Image: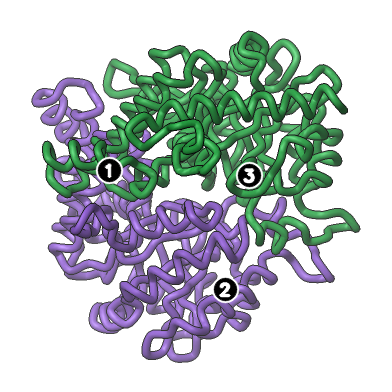
Chain colours: A purple, B green
Amino acid sequence: MINKLITKIQKTNAPIVVGLDPMLSYIPEHIQKAAFEEFGETPAGAAEAIWQYNKAIVDATYDLIPAVKPQIAMYEQFGVEGVKAFQKTVDYCHEKDLVVIGDVKRGDIGSTSAAYATGHLGKVAIGSKSYSTFSEDFATVNPYLGSDGIKPFVDVCKEEKKGIFILVKTSNPSSGEFQDQLIDGRPLYEHIAEKVAEWGSDCMGDSYSYVGAVVGATYPKQGEVLRKLMPKSFILVPGYGAQGGKGADLVHFFNEDGLGAIVNSSRGIIAAYKQDKYKEMGITEMNFADASRAAVEDMIADIKGALESR
Amino acid sequence: MINKLITKIQKTNAPIVVGLDPMLSYIPEHIQKAAFEEFGETPAGAAEAIWQYNKAIVDATYDLIPAVKPQIAMYEQFGVEGVKAFQKTVDYCHEKDLVVIGDVKRGDIGSTSAAYATGHLGKVAIGSKSYSTFSEDFATVNPYLGSDGIKPFVDVCKEEKKGIFILVKTSNPSSGEFQDQLIDGRPLYEHIAEKVAEWGSDCMGDSYSYVGAVVGATYPKQGEVLRKLMPKSFILVPGYGAQGGKGADLVHFFNEDGLGAIVNSSRGIIAAYKQDKYKEMGITEMNFADASRAAVEDMIADIKGALESR
């Protein structure tokens, strides 16, 4: 799957991923209204609104992008109905041949991580049959429990040729509270990065490993160091746009081959219609997905410009 | 909810929690067969088997115990159908007036943690209405992202009088890989424990905080230190039984008041019928839940004995 991700990045010339993190407050009035008329102001109504919103954004952008990253929390908050909308979104993105990165940040003790890996990336055995259930292509994973929480994911990645991105240095303001603490003179996130390189070393695609890392766009200097510590790991870079990261901050997340990083933007793309910039282009919430398409084009140009001028 | 948990522990005289972590391999043949006959060897069939298995165990043990801890990974692996069985289990345990600890180990950046906190512990707003969706009483939370990943959970705990248990020192063999690393001469887990005490200090129940910690039974010495660092935090102690923890290892997880800890056993109780000890009592897989009840009684006696002889 890392090979497919790279092929798609090269084909679209866009090392970006659209974060499908639908908040009800982002979803245009007319979509919410239609969903609530059909299902009431219920979790099923919210799930329908999310799904219609996602579908319109995917339809408007899928030819420009290699991948999407649905954040499962935004679905899980609506309970079972929300999880159904997550599944529907994953399935639809597969239909559109997009690589799907499930932003699930799971991680537990070995046998439990194995269940998460099975559900999100693998196949679950039921009697004499087996099923792919959530069936994302990549999942994000939390490393706090150490190797035996990670290995079951790596095993499933090898079997299924899928991938993971392990949290190394997250984009949020307080990420340093534990991640930056010095151990033998070096921050915890560097120790974890070394483990990421190690875990990934025996499950390689053609040029990059199935095991990648998450490093926030909001920490470009750390990104530069981490790029070198994990030369064969793709870095998933959240925090672009709404969280403050800019194209120029991102160049050091990439290797010399122009690969090695994929930059996520969520709100900046899916709720682009709320920005003055796109309103001035005559976009309203009725054609919100046009703003998403324009925002994808702007993001690609920003990153391409930064990479070319480095 | 911490007050309710304590009241129930005192009433049952049992500081224990039953881990409802159903693997298909634990579920007796006749239950699987009936479920597969109705729904086929499908995720819906697996979900039905899980649900019938859980229900029988809850029915056989609910009067002896204060709480259950369903591990969501074991449900999530079966996709949407599995998540429905999780919800059904949570709802049924509420009917039986059990405290429900959702072992979900969620944790993300602020806005995303807020969505998880809403979905698992809070109420989600949909139009003019609001809904409790998964509606557990407690959730387990991963601290790797720092304060702004934790605060949204704490806020919901205050609003809803619910609780969380934050991973401090986990029960698995490789938990030390990062958690034991020394920072200013003290392991990371101690730094996190201090934060747990701080986060919990302004959301207190009558005698303990809404904010607790997870510390594995497999690390009794660390438990002793951590008990003192977080005097007002309840400690959820996994790793008893199948993972190797024994009653005698557990005494230091408790405060002098005999409270402050709640010990989980999963496989040791829900799959007790597979143990020779219970087979010798004439229990077969047909009356597997009787073994679960006997295992609960044995666990209570083991812990009570250890606490009395300390």
Taking the spot 74% from the left edge, 66% from the top edge, the residue there is A187
**Near-viewer residue (B246 or B198):** B246
- Label 1 CA crowd tier, 10 Å (few <14, some 14–19, many 20+): some
* Disc 3 residue type (three-letter): Gly
Q: In this view, does B193 lie above or below A100?
A: above
Q: In this view, does B91 lie above or below B270?
A: above
Which residue, as the protein is rendered here, is positioned at the far right?
B185
The CA distance from mark 3 to mark 2 is: 27 Å
User: Which mark is drawn over residue B29?
Assistant: 1
Q: Is residue A291 visible?
A: no
Q: Where is residue A204 drawn, in percent x and y? A: 43, 85
User: Label 2 is found on which chain of the structure?
Assistant: A
Taking the spot 24% from the left edge, 35% from the top edge, the residue there is B48
- Label 2 CA crowd tier, 10 Å (few <14, some 14–19, many 20+): many
Q: Where is residue B229 drawn, in percent x and y? A: 84, 36
Q: Is residue A90 above or below residue B168?
A: below
**Near-viewer residue (A291 or B211):** B211
The CA distance from mark 1 to mark 3 is: 27 Å
Query: Which residue position is annotated with label 3?
Result: B239
Q: Where is residue A162 drawn, in percent x and y? A: 34, 71
Q: Are marks 1 and 2 on the same chain?
A: no
Between label 1 and label 3, give the one nearer the viewer.
1
Q: Along the horizontal axis of the image, is A49 left or right of B156?
A: left
Q: Do labels 3 and 2 share a chain?
A: no
Q: Along the horizontal axis of the image, is A135 left or right of A103?
A: left
User: Which mark is drawn over residue B212?
Assistant: none
Between label 1 and label 2, give the one nearer the viewer.
1
Q: Do the residues labelled 3 and 2 touch (CB within 8 Å)?
A: no
